[in-house]
Image: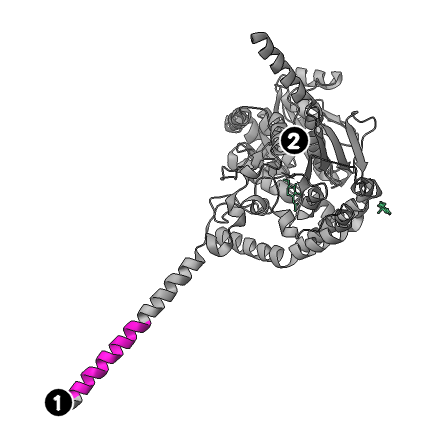
Amino acid sequence: MGKWLGLFLAVAAFSNICDAYRILVVFPLPGKSHNILGVNIVNHLLKAGHEVTYVTPFPVKNPHPKLQQLDVSDNFDLMDEKMLNVKALLNKEISFSNPIKMFTFTIELFEKTVQNPNVVKVFNDTNQKFDAVISEWMYNDAYSGIATLFDCPFIWLSTIEPHWIILSLIDESTNPSYVPDSLSSNIPPFNFKERVSGLFFQLLSSAFKTFYLNGVIEREFERLLGPYLTKRGKAIPSFSDVNYNVSLVLGNSHVSLGQAIRLPQNYIPIGGYHIDPDVKPLPEDLKKILDNAKNGLIYFSMGSNLKSKDLPDELKRGFLNIFSNLKQTVLWKFEEAIPDLPKNVHIVQWAPQPSILAHPNCILFITHGGLLSTTETVHFGKPIIGIPVFGDQFTNIERAVNKGFAIKVTLSYTMLDEFKVAIDEALNNPKYRNKAKELSAIYHDRPVSPGKELVHWVEHVVRTRGAPHLRSPALHVPFYQKFYLDLLGIIVAILSVIVIVLKRVLKLKCKKKENLKKKKN
Ligand SMILES: *[C@@H]1O[C@H](CO)[C@@H](O)[C@H](O)[C@H]1NC(C)=O
Ligand SMILES: *[C@@H]1O[C@H](CO)[C@@H](O)[C@H](O)[C@H]1NC(C)=O
């Protein structure tokens, strides 16, 4: 009996392994950090034995045998000089300077992606089957239509902290009195002005989306994906049926990094999944520098956006001057050689950031505050000095300051004094270090790793055909019912009737009294 059971379990386990799914992952945005998030979803799924088709502007040579790449590197055409602003905007750095430009860009990006010949080949092939579609949400809902094409469940990857727009797709909008907008750097608790501006902005954007943008996206969906549906002999559904049919949102967020707001059952926070839990060994030269940094090492990197050539000479010299007076070693990721380097400063063109942050001698990270970098600092428990440059970096640094493991310095020609003070404070006051360690412990204290969680929930969605049991009932309750406007209407009507009746009765009584008086007279 036991033997048979054992055999049965072995077969069951084996057939489970053979349960490989075909998953389409769509990350069309030509931004490095977006690709890091996309590639790591792909890698986790491949490692779990699934087959992945990846729509990407960054195809690699010699891909994994179970990986098919659909090259959309043409999307780089949309990022020309004129749109430098928008490039900053969407390269993970949403600046709020021109939202209309941003929406136009996201719509063009969708168009260009689904019209790319490599993508068309797959969409136009009725033999192509997928078990799920995963796409990055970047201010455009249209990608959910791709799952309709393949009649399979759809999953969003939300790159930032949970916010009202993404949550309204699977549950309902958040309350602007304590949840900031995705583009806002306000930190709760809000003062009166912040609360009111939050409400105003949310109502305004919500109206823009409902009354304008959704219409645009519906037409895009019909025009660009409709023909493929027709070819498959299917009717074109209304876009709201498509848009509110999302199975899951995978959130690149974790409570240790953000706020503990309430989340629907099908929002799964997997912040940190892009970080390999097995830290790769450092290259020999870097290892030597870090091992020998007896007084600790400060790692300075402004990410891939701020090129050294953009830094004015006086700042470069000023930074070096400050560094040369420190007893710590400084490792600066910088794209060009610098003559007369101080002894304790080392320049590297390329740096394996996680491996550096993981080294015990690394005691401080000076960063632009991209979300991936701030996640990595919490992962490795290192304090930071944040010099935000674009859009969401301001929010990330603001949040890190609020959490207590960061000091913010504003980028400017006159920042050197502030920068020096910040370094001294970060090195001499242990509270930043301690806070980073404390948050890191919370961040790591999870039942399973974020990568495992990712794979589990994607498989769960496929196994349960879109996980309808996880969907929030709030999704289909209209506004007037949620706020009991119908009840309010009934109460107002009843009260009005009572008032009218009372008025009439009083009038009648008055008249009777007057009549009586007249008679007496
Ligand atoms: C899609 O396939 C059909 C044949 O089934 C072909 O006639 C059509 O040109 C293809 N469309 C595109 C855009 O490649
Ligand atoms: C809704 O999702 C299910 C899977 O969860 C899918 O089969 C179906 O095609 C989707 N419907 C629409 C209209 O997108």
The quarter of the picture where the N terminus appears is top right
Question: Is residue 508 shown above or below 459?
Answer: below
Relative image position of residue 120 (x, y in whole percent):
81, 43
Badge 1 density bin: few <14, some 14–19, many ≥20, Cα 10 Å: few
Q: Residue at x 59, y 8 (%)?
A: 3
Front residue of 79 and 384: 79
Residue beneath disc 2? 322
Residue type pointed to by label 2: Ile
| Quadrant of the displayed image that contains ligand 2 | top right
Secondary structure beneath label 1? helix
Secondary structure beneath label 2? helix
Q: Is residue 510 magenta?
A: yes
In the rendered view, does 244 fall on the left or right side of 49? left
Quadrant location of residue 307? top right
Relative image position of residue 148 (x, y in whole percent):
69, 44
Scheme of image coloration: one colour
Question: Is residue 508 shown above or below 53?
Answer: below
Residue beneath disc 1? 520
Give the extent of the magenta segment: 500-517
Residue type pointed to by label 1: Lys
Q: Residue at x 75, y 51 (%)?
A: 226
Q: Please identify the residue farthest to the left as the structure is shown.
A: 520
Relative image position of residue 421 (x, y in whole percent):
57, 34
Front residue of 430 and 76: 76
Question: What's the CA distance linking mark 2 and mark 1?
Answer: 104 Å
In the rendered view, does 388 fall on the left or right side of 265? right
The quarter of the picture where the C terminus appears is bottom left
Quadrant location of residue 159? top right
Q: Is residue 137 magenta?
A: no
Can residue 172 be spotted in the picture?
no
Relative image position of residue 22 (x, y in whole percent):
72, 31
Q: Residue at x 78, y 32 (%)?
A: 335
